[in-house]
Image (tube, rainbow, N blue to C red):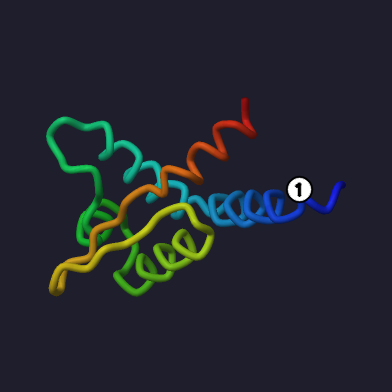
């Protein structure tokens, strides 16, 4: 593989590795679905995941951290509330790879 493609390949590999966990895939899908839902803003609150999944808050936080480290999402804090948003650039990279 040419050297110039290595960073791109490594980014994609990190993203796919993060999404290989079923809980992280569900979290990512929930954020993606919220982005297109007219009833919500473009992100998901951490409490949304805790309420919708049968997983404890520390585990959800770990999964969020893994998705952030993979470049798939970003988080914004507003006081004690944490909102997760898709990283649009990474979503476009994934889409381009799969097409």
Report whether 98 appears left or right of 29.
right
Quadrant, the C terminus: top right
Residue in the foreground of this view, choosing between 58 and 96:
96
Q: What residue sits 42% from the left and 70% below the top?
A: 62
Q: Is residue 65 above or below residue 36?
A: below
- Residue 55, x across and y down, in percent: 34, 63
Q: How many marks?
A: 1
Residue in the foreground of this view, choosing between 38 and 8:
8
Report whether 81 appears left or right of 23.
left
Instruction: Tell me the SS state at disc 1.
Output: helix
The local crowd at label 1, few if under 14, some if 14 to 19, many if 20 or more residues have their Cα within 10 Å, is: few
Residue in the foreground of this view, choosing between 75 and 44:
75
- Residue 25, x across and y down, in percent: 47, 48
- Residue receiving disc 1: 5
Report whether 79 appears left or right of 93.
left
Q: What residue sits 55% from the left and 56% below the top?
A: 18
Q: Quadrant of residue 7?
A: bottom right
Extreme residue in the right direction? 1
- Residue 20, x across and y down, in percent: 58, 51
Q: Is residue 78 above or below residue 86?
A: below
Q: What residue sits 46% from the left and 59% below the top?
A: 67
Q: What residue sits 13% from the left and 73% below the top?
A: 79
- Residue 3, x across and y down, in percent: 83, 53
Extreme residue in the top direction? 99
């Amino acid at each position: 593989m040419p050297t110039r493609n290595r960073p791109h390949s490594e980014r994609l590999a990190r993203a796919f590795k993060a999404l290989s966990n079923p809980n992280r895939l569900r979290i990512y899908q929930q954020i993606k679905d919220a982005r297109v839902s007219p009833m919500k803003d473009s992100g998901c609150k951490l409490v949304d995941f805790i309420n919708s999944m049968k997983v404890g808050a520390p585990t959800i936080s770990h999964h969020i951290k893994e998705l952030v480290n993979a470049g798939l999402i970003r988080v914004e804090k507003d006081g004690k509330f944490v909102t997760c948003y898709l990283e649009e650039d990474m979503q476009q990279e994934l889409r381009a790879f799969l097409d």
